[in-house]
Amino acid sequence: MKKRSFGRRAGALAAATVMAALLAVGVCGCASQGAPDGEASGEGSAAAPMEDAPGNGGSNGQSAAPEKITFVLDWTPNTNHTGLYVAQAEGYFAEQGLEVEIVQPADGTAEAMVASGRGQFGVSFQDTMAPALVGDDALPITAVAAILQHNTSGIVSRAGEGMDRPAGMAGHKYATWDLPVEQATIAKVMSDDGGEFSQVQLVPSTPTDEVSALQSGSVDAIWVFEGWGKAACDVAGLPVDYFNFADISPVFDYYTPVVIANNQFLQEHPETARKFLAALAKGYQYAISNPDGAADILMEQVPELAANADLVRASQQFLSRQYQADAAQWGVMDAGRWSAFYQWLLDNQLIDGALDPATGFTNKYLPAEA
């Protein structure tokens, strides 16, 4: 749930671009590296020509076999993914004539697997997508839906130690992945709050148990998703302070996580993509309106999560208000917010190559607003 794989994913994306380029032609013919035609931002672009997708049954009127879709998670199943599991369990995919297999990225990353065609859809993050979108070996992936409408990540720390605001991190131990974008983010929010990043004690660490890490004193502050890492502390009864990056600097209200898709799949099977996202949106709408029921479904589908049922339920209650939040519908992405963050990366030389700030996402496959 939290970005514990951020460091591994960002570090692996450079290698992933090479792997995907090698696999692309052999696995799915995805040699095209750019976004689908006319989809840099998805605003006002015409739909791609409709073609019969595999399993559509053509025009002979016979019952068609379900179209098969592989969806690649970013890590282990968690409440970010609840709408996906609800759509699976409640038959929303089947209603659309789809058979969806949910897999974890056993090797490489979700971005590389989707780019190579081993998955048609997957989970990524706007920040860690950025390196995959630049250069001659840019991955052929596009974000097609926002799982959460706003960035719910920030810094959690033990309560009462002054880290309820960014400037208070000075003199304290922060668990760092030692990545330029990560540390530039911390430096920016500290500067905006009148603090000095050079005074932070950087401890290379990727805690998998926030509660234990904070209780032991091995670190004082951890970057987490509020709906999981902070929720874990709350459920454990550990008093903590927390601040959200987007509340300090609006440029950090980027999209994290997002659903990504293979560009060639979008070009060749646009109606299938729309069916998939219609079913997925229905799953997230269920989770929004019925968080307790959605938590039950998630734990039924992923039994190992039942060992942390209190955390799952607390997280689900929080995320039920975050999946759509103040947006007109689930999944939609705002071009201004998307571009603002990528422009910040460019302005701070955090991307190695040229990048159109508006590139990498589209809204055109989402269901029409009700």
Image (cartoon, rainbow, N blue to C red):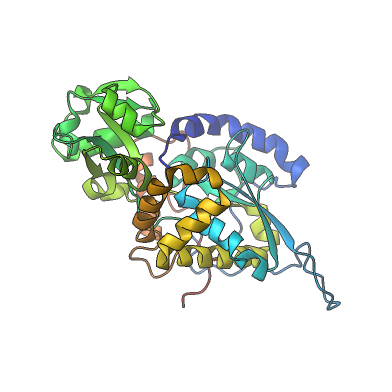
Eyeballing the image, is 42 above or below 299? below
**Can you tell which quarter of the image residue 364 is in?**
bottom right
- The answer, for residue 234, to whether it is visible in the render is yes
Q: Name the side, left or right, on which 28 lies relative to 232.
A: right
How many numbered marks does the figure carry?
Answer: 0
Q: Quick one: 301 or 328, which is closer to the camera?
A: 301
Residue found 58% across the figure and 42% down from its top: 110
**Can you tell which quarter of the image residue 221 is in?**
top left
Residue found 35% across the figure and 50% down from its top: 151
Q: Quick one: 261 or 57, which is closer to the camera?
A: 57
Residue found 17% across the figure and 29% down from its top: 196
**Quarter of the image with the N terminus in it:** top left
**Residue 319 locus on image (x, y percent):** 38, 56
Q: Quick one: 12 or 362, which is closer to the camera?
A: 12
**Residue 48 locus on image (x, y percent):** 64, 66
Eyeballing the image, is 136 above or below 369? above
**Residue 352 locus on image (x, y percent):** 46, 33
Residue found 62% across the figure and 67% down from its top: 275
Q: Name the side, left or right, on which 154 lies relative to 116.
A: left
**Residue 351 locus on image (x, y percent):** 43, 36
Q: Name the side, left or right, on which 70 lies relative to 13.
A: right
Eyeballing the image, is 346 above or below 273? above
- The answer, for residue 354, to whether it is visible in the render is no
